[in-house]
Amino acid sequence: PAAWEFYDLERDPGELVNRYDDPAYADIIRDLKARLKARREALNETDEDNPRIQAIIDENWNE
């Protein structure tokens, strides 16, 4: 299944512990997702030509 991943590379350079659900990182993750969305919009990048990918994004974006 699709899942978000977020690693604290300073504390976990081997990317062994996914911190996506850790409340301590919620503000950082929210900011990164907003920046990703803005960048995709600025580049007019969509997944309209790949409905399967777009469906995964739509379903999981706010998780």
Image (cartoon, rainbow, N blue to C red):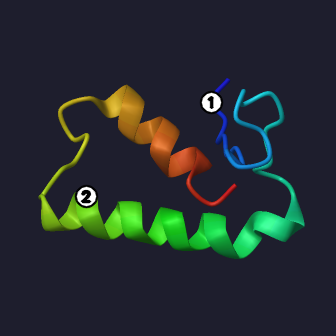
16 in relation to 20, above or below = above
Q: Is mark 2 on a helix, strand or loop?
A: helix
Left/right placement of residue 34 relative to residue 49 reads right
Q: What element carries label 1?
A: loop
Which residue is at 39% across, 31% downward? 53
Q: Distance between the residues labelled 2 and 1?
A: 19 Å
Q: Nearer the viewer, mark 2 or mark 1?
A: 2
4 in relation to 37, above or below = above
Quarter of the N terminus within the rendering: top right
How packed is label 1: few (under 14 Cα within 10 Å), some, or many (20 or more)? few
| Residue matched to label 2 | 40
Quarter of the C terminus within the rendering: bottom right
Residue 33 position, x and y percent, is 50, 63
Which residue is at 36% across, 64% downward? 37
Residue 22 position, x and y percent, is 87, 57
Left/right placement of residue 7 relative to residue 42 reads right
Q: Which amino acid does label 1 sit on?
A: Ala
What is the quadrant of residue 31 in the picture? Answer: bottom right
Residue 50 position, x and y percent, is 26, 29
Left/right placement of residue 30 relative to residue 48 reads right
For marks 2 and 1, the one nearer the N-term is 1
Residue 5 position, x and y percent, is 66, 40
Residue sitting nearer the eye, 50 or 34: 34
Question: What numbered label is drawn on residue 2?
Answer: 1
What is the quadrant of residue 17 in the picture? Answer: top right
Residue sitting nearer the eye, 45 or 36: 36
Which residue is at 67% across, 35% downward? 3
Residue sitting nearer the eye, 39 or 17: 17
